[in-house]
Structure formats: C-alpha cells, structure tokens
Amino acid sequence: MSCFSFLKVMMVLFNLAIALGGATLLGIGIWVSVDNSSFVGIFGPLSSSVLQFVNVGYLLIAIGVVLFVLGFLGCCGAQKESKCLLIMFFSIVLIIFIVEVAAAVVALVYTSLAETILQTTVTPSLKKDYAKNPDITTVWNTTMIKLKCCGLMNYTDFDDSYYFQTYHEYPPTCCSNDTQATCTAGLASKSNVRGCFSQLLSEIRTHAGVVGGVAAGIAALEIAAMAVAMYLYCHLDEK
C-alpha cells in the first residue's frame, strides 16, 4: 500500500470516528437540554458548576453539529478524493485551532475579564431564578453543597434576590460555621464562604495537568489532521 493510500484510509477512519463522536455529543446535548437534573446527578458537582456558567445542552449541540460536519467533510473528501472538500476540511480545522489558541490565551491572561462577563450574565440569573426555577435551584444547591461555596462571587450575590426577598435570609451554605441558625448577613460575612467562581477555578487548577494533557492531545490531532488533509490535497493531481 502506498503512502497516499494509507493516509487516505486513515483519514476516512479518523473522520468517521469524529462524525460518530459529533453525533454522540449531539444526542447528549439534546438530553442535557431536556433533563439537566439527570446530567448533574450522574456527573457530579463539577458538571453543576459548569451548568451555571454556560448552557451545556446548547453548547454540546453546537459542538456536536460542528464535529459531525467536520467528520463528514474529511471522510467524504478523502474517500471521493475531492480537493474542494479537503480544503474546506483544512480551513475549518485551522479556524477551530486558531480560536482555541486565542481562547486559551484570553483565559490565562484575562481571568478578570471572564469574571466580569460572568458577573454580568450569571449573577442576574441567580438573583432572579434561584428558589423560583427548580432546575436552576437544583444546579446551584448541588454546586454550593459539594464545593462548599456561596453564590458566584460571595454571599452578596443574593442581595435583593428572589430568595432573599421571599425568605429574608441567605442560603444555609453561605453560613457554614452555624448551619442551625438563620443565615443572616452578619453570619454570612463572618463565615466568609468563598464564591463558586473561585472554587471552580481551584478545581480546574487542581486538575491542570489533566486539562493541559487533553488540550495538548486535541491540538496534536488537529495539526496532524491538517497535515494529512494538505498532503492528500497536494498529491491528488499526482495520483
């Protein structure tokens, strides 16, 4: 088997796996959108933390669609030896790679910017829907109990919230030192329970090696896929 034929077969198999993976993520995304409480129950507190900051269901659906289309282009481009499909595949992977690098740089350098964005998007939802929307309440309660945190930044996120206006107190997790008493502003301030955002960052930093390894592996696969696609594209005329 020639090098061209070998890479063509590997390209087909690799992108077939990507397409199947995309279809799987699409299905999971639909499931999370319909029943996110089951998702929290299966995957634990970290998943509930993520659910606070992004709509995981829609995010998985979007990623699933992109991966399925990407796998389809790569698989069909290699199988049919189509230069048009191969260059489309290469361009999409290149764009994704650039976006990932840019996102990583922003996440590392501009953590405060991410904090500001989350405060303007997540905190209003917390104030409005906590104790009113059962799904959001379950997500927050699971996160605050498992990660031992309170609100996004701290207990003041519940000031003027639906929960505070209804019960005239803060959630019990905001007063970890005295869970039997009513959680007032004084007790919450004395307890000094950290916000869930800082706790989530601590969790991520604790597993930084795993996260970095996965990111490096994905980057290596993307570079390899682009290299193979470009090789096939350049050698189609010679075949």
Image: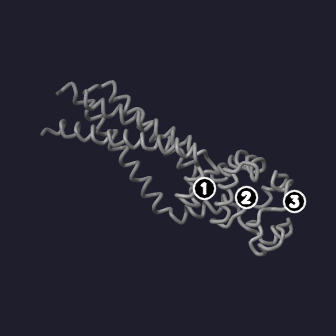
Mark 1: which secondary structure?
Answer: helix
Residue at the (59%, 61%) spot, across then down: 45
Q: Quadrant of residue 83?
A: top left
Labels 3 & 2 near each other (Cβ < 8 A): no
Residue at the (72%, 48%) spot, across then down: 133
Mark 2: which secondary structure?
Answer: loop
**Quadrant including the C terminus:** top left
Task: Point out the tag, 2 or 1, that comes first from the N-terminus.
Answer: 1
Residue carrying label 2: 151
- Within 10 Å of disc 3 (Cα), the crowding (few <14, some 14-19, many 20+) is some
- Within 10 Å of disc 1 (Cα), the crowding (few <14, some 14-19, many 20+) is many
- Looking at the rendered image, the disc whose residue lies closer to the viewer, 2 or 1, is 1
Q: Quadrant of residue 198?
A: bottom right
Side (left or right) of 7 relative to 58: left
Task: Point out the tag, 1 or 3, that comes first from the N-terminus.
Answer: 1
Side (left or right) of 144 relative to 94: right
Residue type beneath disc 1: Ser
Position of residue 30 measured from the top left corner of the image (x, y, whole percent): 52, 41
In the displayed structure, 114 sits above or below 192; it is above
Residue type beneath disc 3: His
Alpha-carbon span between mark 3 and mark 2: 16 Å
Residue type beneath disc 2: Gly
Alpha-carbon span between mark 2 and mark 1: 13 Å
Quick one: 201 or 63, which is closer to the camera? 63
Check the image and name the residue furthest to the left: 1
- Looking at the rendered image, the disc whose residue lies closer to the viewer, 3 or 2, is 3
> Looking at the image, how many numbered discs can be counted on the residues?
3
Task: Point out the tag, 3 or 2, that comes first from the N-terminus.
Answer: 2
Position of residue 211 measured from the top left corner of the image (x, y, whole percent): 48, 58
Residue carrying label 1: 48
Position of residue 99 measured from the top left corner of the image (x, y, whole percent): 50, 41
Residue carrying label 3: 168
